Image: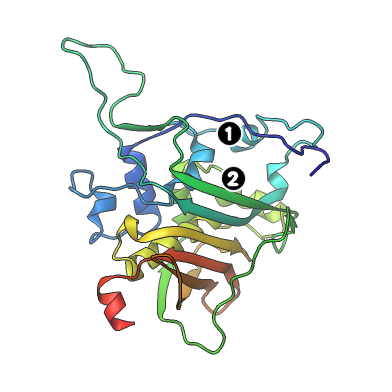
Amino acid sequence: MSGPGAGFEYPPKEVSWLKRDALLFAASIGCTSDELQFLFEPDPNFSVFPTYPVVLPFKIDAQEVIDFYAAQKAIKIPGVPEFDARRVVDGQRLVQFLKPLPRPRPAKRPPGHRGRDADGPGRGRLRRRLLARHRQRLLRGAGQLGRAQGPATENFPPPKGKKPDVVFEDQTTPQTALLYRLNGDYNPLHAHPEPGKKMGFGGAIVHGLYSFNSSCHGLLQKLGGSDPKNIKEFQARFASPVKPGDKLVTQAWRTGEMKGEWEEIRFVTSVEGGKVCLSNGRALMKVVGEAKSKL
Protein backbone atom coordinates (compact mmCIF):
# COMPACT_ATOMS: atom_id res chain seq x y z
CA MET A 1 0.00 0.00 0.00
CA SER A 2 1.42 3.39 -0.98
CA GLY A 3 0.32 6.99 -1.24
CA PRO A 4 -0.16 9.97 1.06
CA GLY A 5 -0.51 8.89 4.66
CA ALA A 6 0.19 5.21 3.94
CA GLY A 7 1.73 3.51 6.94
CA PHE A 8 0.99 6.41 9.29
CA GLU A 9 0.13 5.37 12.83
CA TYR A 10 -1.48 7.67 15.34
CA PRO A 11 0.62 7.92 18.49
CA PRO A 12 -0.78 5.92 21.43
CA LYS A 13 -2.67 7.89 24.04
CA GLU A 14 -3.47 7.10 27.62
CA VAL A 15 -7.19 7.21 28.34
CA SER A 16 -9.05 7.24 31.63
CA TRP A 17 -12.54 7.24 33.07
CA LEU A 18 -14.30 7.49 36.42
CA LYS A 19 -17.14 5.40 37.78
CA ARG A 20 -19.30 8.43 37.12
CA ASP A 21 -18.35 8.26 33.42
CA ALA A 22 -19.38 4.60 33.22
CA LEU A 23 -22.71 5.35 34.94
CA LEU A 24 -23.41 8.32 32.65
CA PHE A 25 -22.68 6.26 29.53
CA ALA A 26 -25.01 3.47 30.61
CA ALA A 27 -27.81 5.89 31.47
CA SER A 28 -27.36 7.82 28.22
CA ILE A 29 -27.77 4.73 25.99
CA GLY A 30 -30.91 3.45 27.68
CA CYS A 31 -29.85 1.01 30.39
CA THR A 32 -32.78 0.48 32.75
CA SER A 33 -33.36 0.11 36.47
CA ASP A 34 -33.34 -3.68 36.19
CA GLU A 35 -29.73 -3.46 34.93
CA LEU A 36 -28.14 -2.06 38.07
CA GLN A 37 -24.85 -3.75 37.18
CA PHE A 38 -24.37 -0.83 34.74
CA LEU A 39 -26.08 1.92 36.76
CA PHE A 40 -25.27 1.37 40.45
CA GLU A 41 -21.61 1.27 41.39
CA PRO A 42 -22.01 -0.74 44.68
CA ASP A 43 -23.68 -3.56 42.75
CA PRO A 44 -21.56 -6.72 43.19
CA ASN A 45 -21.61 -7.24 39.41
CA PHE A 46 -20.91 -3.60 38.54
CA SER A 47 -19.53 -3.46 34.99
CA VAL A 48 -18.63 -0.87 32.39
CA PHE A 49 -20.97 -1.34 29.40
CA PRO A 50 -18.89 -3.18 26.76
CA THR A 51 -19.14 -0.57 23.96
CA TYR A 52 -17.84 2.22 26.21
CA PRO A 53 -14.42 2.20 24.45
CA VAL A 54 -15.97 3.89 21.38
CA VAL A 55 -16.16 7.19 23.28
CA LEU A 56 -12.60 7.09 24.60
CA PRO A 57 -10.96 8.39 21.37
CA PHE A 58 -13.04 11.55 21.91
CA LYS A 59 -12.77 11.79 25.66
CA ILE A 60 -9.13 10.62 26.10
CA ASP A 61 -8.63 11.57 29.76
CA ALA A 62 -10.57 14.84 29.90
CA GLN A 63 -13.11 15.55 32.63
CA GLU A 64 -14.15 18.91 31.17
CA VAL A 65 -15.84 19.92 27.92
CA ILE A 66 -13.35 20.22 25.06
CA ASP A 67 -13.27 22.03 21.70
CA PHE A 68 -14.27 19.19 19.39
CA TYR A 69 -13.04 20.78 16.14
CA ALA A 70 -9.66 21.75 17.61
CA ALA A 71 -9.18 18.26 19.05
CA GLN A 72 -9.80 16.64 15.68
CA LYS A 73 -7.07 18.81 14.12
CA ALA A 74 -4.51 18.15 16.86
CA ILE A 75 -2.62 15.48 14.89
CA LYS A 76 -1.59 16.09 11.28
CA ILE A 77 -0.82 13.24 8.88
CA PRO A 78 2.16 14.02 6.59
CA GLY A 79 1.11 14.51 2.98
CA VAL A 80 -2.61 14.38 3.75
CA PRO A 81 -4.92 17.46 3.65
CA GLU A 82 -6.02 18.73 7.01
CA PHE A 83 -8.94 16.79 8.47
CA ASP A 84 -12.15 18.86 8.38
CA ALA A 85 -14.50 17.58 11.08
CA ARG A 86 -17.21 19.88 9.72
CA ARG A 87 -17.54 17.72 6.59
CA VAL A 88 -17.06 14.19 7.95
CA VAL A 89 -19.42 11.80 9.69
CA ASP A 90 -19.18 8.18 10.78
CA GLY A 91 -19.48 5.50 8.12
CA GLN A 92 -19.09 2.20 9.94
CA ARG A 93 -17.86 0.85 13.26
CA LEU A 94 -16.71 -2.54 14.47
CA VAL A 95 -15.88 -3.33 18.09
CA GLN A 96 -14.40 -6.64 19.21
CA PHE A 97 -14.52 -7.28 22.96
CA LEU A 98 -11.35 -9.07 24.04
CA LYS A 99 -11.44 -8.59 27.82
CA PRO A 100 -13.87 -6.87 30.21
CA LEU A 101 -13.05 -3.22 30.82
CA PRO A 102 -11.56 -2.85 34.30
CA ARG A 103 -13.79 -1.24 36.88
CA PRO A 104 -12.41 2.04 38.20
CA ARG A 105 -11.00 1.55 41.69
CA PRO A 106 -10.26 4.08 44.42
CA ALA A 107 -6.67 5.23 44.38
CA LYS A 108 -4.55 3.90 47.26
CA ARG A 109 -3.21 6.59 49.54
CA PRO A 110 -0.58 6.19 52.21
CA PRO A 111 -1.50 7.02 55.83
CA GLY A 112 -1.55 10.77 56.43
CA HIS A 113 -1.55 11.54 52.70
CA ARG A 114 -3.31 14.84 51.93
CA GLY A 115 -2.11 15.56 48.45
CA ARG A 116 -3.97 14.87 45.20
CA ASP A 117 -3.28 11.52 43.55
CA ALA A 118 -2.41 11.63 39.88
CA ASP A 119 -5.02 9.00 39.06
CA GLY A 120 -7.72 10.54 41.21
CA PRO A 121 -10.35 8.53 43.07
CA GLY A 122 -12.13 5.74 41.26
CA ARG A 123 -10.38 6.19 37.94
CA GLY A 124 -9.85 3.47 35.35
CA ARG A 125 -6.87 3.73 33.04
CA LEU A 126 -5.55 1.96 29.98
CA ARG A 127 -1.83 1.79 29.37
CA ARG A 128 -1.21 -0.32 26.25
CA ARG A 129 -3.58 -3.05 27.43
CA LEU A 130 -5.50 -4.64 24.56
CA LEU A 131 -9.03 -4.92 25.94
CA ALA A 132 -11.01 -4.10 22.80
CA ARG A 133 -10.32 -3.69 19.09
CA HIS A 134 -12.13 -0.84 17.38
CA ARG A 135 -12.31 -0.08 13.66
CA GLN A 136 -13.86 3.00 12.11
CA ARG A 137 -14.75 3.99 8.56
CA LEU A 138 -15.53 7.63 7.75
CA LEU A 139 -17.85 9.32 5.26
CA ARG A 140 -16.83 12.58 3.66
CA GLY A 141 -19.46 14.96 2.35
CA ALA A 142 -22.93 16.02 3.45
CA GLY A 143 -26.61 15.35 2.94
CA GLN A 144 -27.17 11.58 2.80
CA LEU A 145 -23.95 10.87 4.69
CA GLY A 146 -21.62 11.49 1.76
CA ARG A 147 -18.95 9.22 0.29
CA ALA A 148 -17.13 6.41 2.03
CA GLN A 149 -13.41 6.62 2.68
CA GLY A 150 -11.45 3.37 2.71
CA PRO A 151 -11.73 -0.14 1.28
CA ALA A 152 -15.07 -1.90 0.81
CA THR A 153 -16.31 -3.96 3.73
CA GLU A 154 -18.13 -7.28 3.92
CA ASN A 155 -21.93 -7.15 3.86
CA PHE A 156 -24.16 -8.88 6.42
CA PRO A 157 -27.78 -8.55 5.20
CA PRO A 158 -30.72 -9.97 7.18
CA PRO A 159 -31.77 -13.54 6.30
CA LYS A 160 -34.17 -13.51 3.33
CA GLY A 161 -37.77 -14.50 3.95
CA LYS A 162 -37.39 -14.88 7.72
CA LYS A 163 -39.26 -12.82 10.30
CA PRO A 164 -37.06 -11.18 12.94
CA ASP A 165 -36.62 -13.13 16.17
CA VAL A 166 -36.52 -9.95 18.25
CA VAL A 167 -37.91 -6.45 17.72
CA PHE A 168 -37.35 -3.58 20.16
CA GLU A 169 -37.85 0.20 20.14
CA ASP A 170 -36.01 3.25 21.42
CA GLN A 171 -37.86 6.58 21.57
CA THR A 172 -35.36 9.45 21.32
CA THR A 173 -36.17 12.95 22.57
CA PRO A 174 -34.86 16.46 21.86
CA GLN A 175 -32.52 15.89 24.83
CA THR A 176 -31.09 12.53 23.73
CA ALA A 177 -28.02 13.90 21.95
CA LEU A 178 -27.52 16.64 24.56
CA LEU A 179 -27.18 13.94 27.22
CA TYR A 180 -25.10 11.54 25.13
CA ARG A 181 -22.55 14.25 24.21
CA LEU A 182 -21.55 14.49 27.88
CA ASN A 183 -19.69 11.19 27.39
CA GLY A 184 -17.02 13.22 25.60
CA ASP A 185 -18.25 13.48 21.99
CA TYR A 186 -18.83 17.23 21.86
CA ASN A 187 -19.36 17.59 18.10
CA PRO A 188 -21.56 20.71 17.66
CA LEU A 189 -23.43 18.82 14.91
CA HIS A 190 -25.37 17.07 17.67
CA ALA A 191 -26.21 20.11 19.79
CA HIS A 192 -26.72 23.19 17.59
CA PRO A 193 -28.76 23.44 14.35
CA GLU A 194 -26.23 25.45 12.30
CA PRO A 195 -23.62 22.72 11.57
CA GLY A 196 -26.37 20.31 10.52
CA LYS A 197 -27.91 22.89 8.20
CA LYS A 198 -24.55 23.48 6.51
CA MET A 199 -24.10 19.73 6.01
CA GLY A 200 -27.55 19.34 4.48
CA PHE A 201 -29.27 17.64 7.44
CA GLY A 202 -31.62 20.54 8.19
CA GLY A 203 -30.49 20.88 11.79
CA ALA A 204 -28.94 18.94 14.65
CA ILE A 205 -28.85 15.15 14.37
CA VAL A 206 -28.41 12.43 16.98
CA HIS A 207 -24.93 10.91 17.25
CA GLY A 208 -24.58 7.86 15.03
CA LEU A 209 -22.76 6.30 17.97
CA TYR A 210 -25.82 6.84 20.14
CA SER A 211 -27.85 4.65 17.77
CA PHE A 212 -24.93 2.21 17.62
CA ASN A 213 -24.64 1.92 21.39
CA SER A 214 -28.38 1.89 22.12
CA SER A 215 -28.89 -0.91 19.57
CA CYS A 216 -26.09 -2.90 21.19
CA HIS A 217 -27.74 -2.34 24.55
CA GLY A 218 -31.06 -3.63 23.23
CA LEU A 219 -29.47 -6.76 21.77
CA LEU A 220 -27.56 -7.50 24.95
CA GLN A 221 -30.68 -6.93 27.04
CA LYS A 222 -33.03 -9.02 24.89
CA LEU A 223 -30.71 -11.86 23.88
CA GLY A 224 -27.74 -11.84 26.25
CA GLY A 225 -29.36 -11.39 29.66
CA SER A 226 -27.66 -7.96 30.00
CA ASP A 227 -24.40 -9.79 30.74
CA PRO A 228 -21.31 -8.27 29.07
CA LYS A 229 -19.74 -11.73 28.88
CA ASN A 230 -22.39 -12.74 26.33
CA ILE A 231 -21.25 -10.47 23.50
CA LYS A 232 -17.99 -10.88 21.60
CA GLU A 233 -18.32 -8.55 18.60
CA PHE A 234 -20.63 -5.79 17.40
CA GLN A 235 -20.70 -3.78 14.18
CA ALA A 236 -22.99 -1.61 12.07
CA ARG A 237 -22.93 0.77 9.11
CA PHE A 238 -24.39 4.27 9.48
CA ALA A 239 -26.92 4.51 6.64
CA SER A 240 -28.93 7.69 7.33
CA PRO A 241 -29.24 10.38 10.01
CA VAL A 242 -31.50 10.26 13.05
CA LYS A 243 -33.29 13.41 14.18
CA PRO A 244 -34.00 14.16 17.85
CA GLY A 245 -37.45 12.78 18.63
CA ASP A 246 -37.28 9.91 16.13
CA LYS A 247 -38.29 6.45 17.33
CA LEU A 248 -35.74 3.76 16.50
CA VAL A 249 -36.92 0.24 15.73
CA THR A 250 -34.40 -2.59 15.71
CA GLN A 251 -35.11 -5.98 14.13
CA ALA A 252 -32.71 -8.83 14.91
CA TRP A 253 -32.34 -12.32 13.49
CA ARG A 254 -30.61 -15.37 14.91
CA THR A 255 -28.78 -17.10 12.07
CA GLY A 256 -27.84 -20.32 13.82
CA GLU A 257 -24.33 -19.90 12.41
CA MET A 258 -21.74 -20.48 15.11
CA LYS A 259 -18.24 -19.06 15.38
CA GLY A 260 -17.00 -21.39 18.06
CA GLU A 261 -19.31 -20.77 21.04
CA TRP A 262 -20.69 -17.52 19.57
CA GLU A 263 -23.84 -17.28 17.42
CA GLU A 264 -24.00 -14.75 14.61
CA ILE A 265 -26.85 -12.26 15.07
CA ARG A 266 -27.82 -9.89 12.28
CA PHE A 267 -29.84 -6.72 12.80
CA VAL A 268 -31.21 -3.58 11.16
CA THR A 269 -32.19 -0.38 12.96
CA SER A 270 -34.65 1.99 11.28
CA VAL A 271 -36.45 5.21 12.08
CA GLU A 272 -40.09 4.24 12.60
CA GLY A 273 -41.93 4.79 9.32
CA GLY A 274 -38.71 5.90 7.63
CA LYS A 275 -35.26 4.92 6.49
CA VAL A 276 -32.78 2.41 7.80
CA CYS A 277 -30.25 4.24 9.97
CA LEU A 278 -28.04 1.26 10.93
CA SER A 279 -27.46 -1.37 8.27
CA ASN A 280 -24.98 -4.23 7.96
CA GLY A 281 -25.61 -4.97 11.63
CA ARG A 282 -23.88 -8.03 13.02
CA ALA A 283 -23.07 -9.30 16.49
CA LEU A 284 -21.49 -12.44 17.90
CA MET A 285 -23.40 -13.44 21.02
CA LYS A 286 -24.38 -16.17 23.43
CA VAL A 287 -28.18 -16.26 23.56
CA VAL A 288 -29.24 -17.12 27.10
CA GLY A 289 -32.10 -17.52 29.54
CA GLU A 290 -35.70 -16.73 28.59
CA ALA A 291 -34.68 -15.46 25.15
CA LYS A 292 -33.08 -18.80 24.34
CA SER A 293 -36.14 -20.80 25.40
CA LYS A 294 -38.56 -18.57 23.49
CA LEU A 295 -36.53 -18.61 20.31
Q: Earlier in the sequence, mark 1 or mark 2?
A: 1
Q: What kind of residue is marked 1?
A: Asp
Q: Quadrant of the N terminus?
A: top right
Quarter where residue 173 is shown: bottom left
Q: Is residue 207 visible?
A: no
Image location of residue 251, percent across then percent down: 47, 76
Front-most of residues 214 and 160? 160
Image location of residue 71, percent across then percent down: 61, 33
Secondary structure of the residue carrying tag 2 is helix
Residue closest to the far bottom: 161
Crowd band around label 2 with a 10 angstrom C-alpha radius: few (<14), some (14–19), many (20+): some
Quarter where residue 105 is shown: top left
Q: Which residue is mark 1?
A: 67
Front-most of residues 287 and 215? 287
For residue 61, side relative to residue 189 (left or right):
left
For residue 105, side relative to residue 209 (left or right):
left
Q: Is residue 32 visible?
A: yes
Q: Quadrant of the C terminus?
A: bottom left
Q: Which residue is at 38% across, 65% downward?
A: 261
> In the drawing, what numbered circle is on residue 213?
none
Q: What kind of residue is marked 2?
A: Pro
Q: Which residue is at 83% across, 40% downward?
A: 3
Q: Which residue is mark 2?
A: 188
Image location of residue 23, percent across then percent down: 32, 46
Q: How is the image coloured?
A: rainbow
Q: CA distance from mark 1 to mark 2?
A: 9 Å
Image location of residue 5, percent across then percent down: 77, 37
Label count reads: 2
For residue 88, side relative to residue 231 (left or right):
right
Q: Which residue is at 44% across, 29% downward?
A: 127
Q: Which residue is at 25% across, 72% downward?
A: 289
Secondary structure of the residue carrying tag 1 is loop
